Image (cartoon, rainbow, N blue to C red):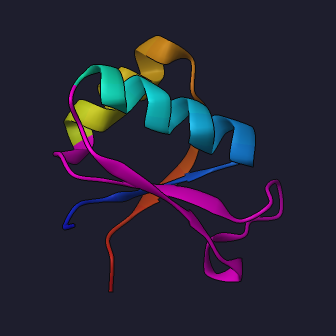
């Protein structure tokens, strides 16, 4: 799956993000890694299979707070 990775503050946000993306027919995968850990979070991220702008708009409308967005190495 190619696409951006959205860093979120908690597993709850990651699960909400995955659920809301499914409603739009977008596949995603929750990632757990210290690589994604921030000072304000616990290291969860959501990798999406759509353009960054599309997912960002969906998350914004759903009230899902995104810490940052990264591209996979």
Q: Is residue 24 above or below residue 17?
A: above
- Location of the N terminus (image quadrant): bottom left
Which residue is rendered at x = 55% and y = 58% of the image? Answer: 45
Q: Residue 53, how many percent across, how many down?
A: 23, 37
Which residue is rendered at x = 45% and y = 21% of the image? Answer: 60
Which residue is rendered at x = 35% and y = 31% of the image? Answer: 21
Q: Residue 14, how many percent across, how many down?
A: 59, 44
Q: In this view, does 17 lie above or below 33?
A: above
Left or right, residue 38 beside residue 47: right
Quadrant assignment, res 43: bottom right
- Location of the C terminus (image quadrant): bottom left
Quadrant assignment, res 70: bottom left
Q: What stretch is highlighted in magenta?
A: 25-52
Q: In the rendered image, is residue 14 in sight?
A: yes
Any magenta on residue 39? yes
Which residue is rendered at x = 21% and y = 52% of the image? Answer: 49
Q: Residue 44, how many percent across, how many down?
A: 65, 59
Q: In this view, does 42 lie above or below 73?
A: above
Left or right, residue 5 beside residue 39: left
Q: Residue furthest top?
A: 61
Any magenta on residue 46? yes
Q: Residue 38, how many percent across, how many down?
A: 74, 65
Q: Which residue lies furthest to the bottom in this view?
A: 73
Q: In the rendered image, is residue 10 in sight?
A: no
């Amino acid at each position: 799956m190619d696409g951006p990775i959205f860093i979120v503050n908690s597993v709850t946000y990651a699960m909400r993000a995955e659920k809301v993306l499914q409603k739009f027919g977008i596949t995603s995968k929750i990632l757990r890694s210290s690589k994604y850990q921030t000072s304000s979070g616990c290291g969860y991220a959501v990798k999406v299979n759509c353009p960054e702008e599309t997912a960002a708009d969906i998350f914004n409308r759903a009230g899902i707070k995104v810490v940052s967005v990264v591209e996979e190495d």
